[in-house]
Amino acid sequence: MPSTSHPDVDIDWIKRDRKVIRGLDHLGVELVSVALYQNLLPGLTNVTQRARYYSFYPWVIDRYVRSAASVGDRVAWRTRIRRLDFAYATACMAFEASVGESRDASIVGGDKAREVLAGQAETDLVDLKAASDVDASGRVIDGGYFKSPQGGFGQYYQVPLQELGVLQPHEEPVWPSVKLTTFAGEPLCRAVDETQDFERLEEAALSGAASVLELAGLGRGIHPDAMDPNGREAEILTSLLFMTDEDICRGQDVARHRSRRDSLRLMLDFAARGQNARRPDNGFRWSCMVGVLPDCVFHAS
């Protein structure tokens, strides 16, 4: 039988289906994960993986509002949030490079930051404007670090921060469209102010450039892993997530958010027992899925 193989022939549908477009969920399978997160962990999502962003973004809003910037200027606000967002990513990536390890940091804009830092010497200046600034109409410039005009804040964290009662909508149509709550947002920002490297980060971001060495030094103090577990910032975030302070949590729906407290306690109990010590998160998910969660001392209250 003659061969029917034609290796040199391009078949359109084969070439087309070989093209994989990342980020699409054609069957809507991810909706199941999203629904589970919303019910078990209100205020947290599968893309809000770092607690420090829950304090960093409110701090950016606070600094912007307290500055001479014109509140209500869309371009000014987008420029500020994106510049600081990218400066934060670049500082964290520079720090990780300086210590020779990747910490799986889930840093917004981390890929672009690593690209900008590639091949740079410690004394080289890093341009923090080109990858983050918007055009005169407030649109993201081609090649920018993030397509969302408000960076990771607008794409990932704004809604969860409102759900936790840290932010609330403005009554007037201004930019940013949210403001800090007095009972949670403002105390959280005062706690961030205690880490002076954040103020230095703002200075570098607004100047538009900083050396690799300077950024690495900033990253050491502001990296998500650098948060002091015994500090005021961590204390407020813990109170928000575990609902241990009625005053700080008064912007939350107690009945709805109790499930987050109970879910987090159960996860911590699982991890404390050393179940799947290398990846307790994966171990916990699989245990729940197959119904073999070990006996726990946890009791919902």
Image (tube, grey):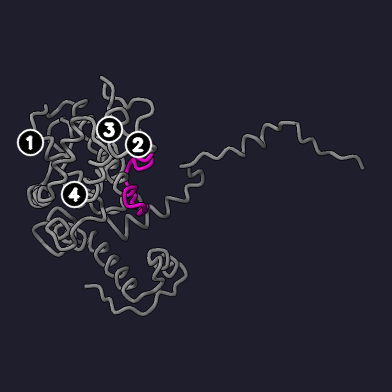
Q: Name the residue under label 2.
A: 120
Q: Give the range drawn in magenta.
A: 96-117
Q: Where is residue 252 in the image (x, y as percent from the top left)?
A: 17, 55
Q: Are marks 2 and 1 in contact (CB under 8 Å)?
A: no
What SS does tag 1 mark?
A: helix
Q: Position of residue 110 (x, y in %)?
A: 35, 43
- How far is disc 3 from disc 2 in space, using C-alphas? 8 Å
- How far is disc 4 from disc 2 in space, using C-alphas? 30 Å
Q: Where is residue 243 in the image (x, y as percent from the top left)?
A: 17, 62
Judging depth in this view, the residue of 19 and 288 nearest the camera is: 19
- Chain-order first, disc 2 or disc 1: 1
- Residue 56, magenta (yes or no): no
The numbered mark at residue 66 is 1
Q: Position of residue 5 (x, y in %)?
A: 81, 39
The numbered mark at residue 55 is 4
Categorize mark 4 by other alpha carbons within 10 Å: few (<14), some (14-19), many (20+): many
The numbered mark at residue 118 is none
Q: Residue furthest top?
A: 136
- Chain-order first, disc 4 or disc 2: 4
Q: Name the residue under label 3.
A: 125
**Identity, as a three-letter code, of the amino acid under mark 4:** Ser
- Chain-order first, disc 3 or disc 2: 2
At a point 21% along the width and 34% down the height, the residue shown is: 205
Judging depth in this view, the residue of 77 and 294 nearest the camera is: 77
